Amino acid sequence: MSKLAKTITFSFTSNAFERTKATETFTFEELEIKESLSEKELGIKLDRIHQAWIWDKLNVSGNIVIDKPETFQ
């Protein structure tokens, strides 16, 4: 019988922007997490990875353009 890999699912939803959300599931191996970590160590590591994942998903660029009306002569 094969051992099933432990997985963790990250997700977020924006309260400010409709339809801005993401969900993704990873194995502990993909995230390079040792299953031998204590519950506290695991919580700290997952919190850091989750925050980095969210910021990566929200990695956007933008600019503001102000149109200046042509002056009449």
Image: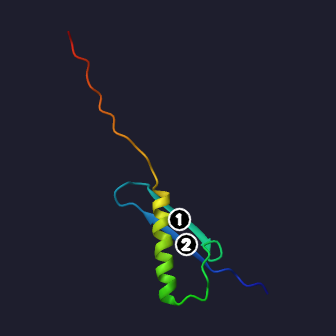
| Residue 66 relative to residue 26: left or right | left
Residue at the spot x=30%, y=28% of the render? Answer: 67
In the rendered image, the vertical position of residue 51 relative to residue 20, given as above or below: below
Residue 71 sits in which quadrant? top left
User: Mark 2 or mark 1, which is nearer the start of the sequence?
Assistant: 2
- Which residue bears the numbered disc 1? 23
Q: Nearer the viewer, residue 57 or 22?
A: 57
Disc 1/disc 2 C-alpha distance (Å): 7 Å
Q: Residues within 10 Å of mark 2 (few under 14, many from 20)?
A: few
Q: Secondary structure at mark 1?
A: strand
Q: Amino acid at mark 2?
A: Thr
At a point 63% along the width and 80% down the height, the residue shown is 6
Q: Is the N terminus in the top left, top right, bottom left or bottom right quadrant?
A: bottom right
| Disc 2 element | strand
Q: On the image, numbered disc 2 is attached to which residue?
A: 9
Q: How is the image coloured?
A: rainbow
The amino acid type, in three-letter code, at marker 1 is Thr
Category of crowding for the residue at label 1, using alpha-carbon neighbours closer than 10 angstroms: few (below 14), some (14–19), many (at least 20): few
| Image spot of residue 26 (x, y percent) | 61, 71
| Cβ atoms at labels 1 and 2 below 8 Å apart | yes
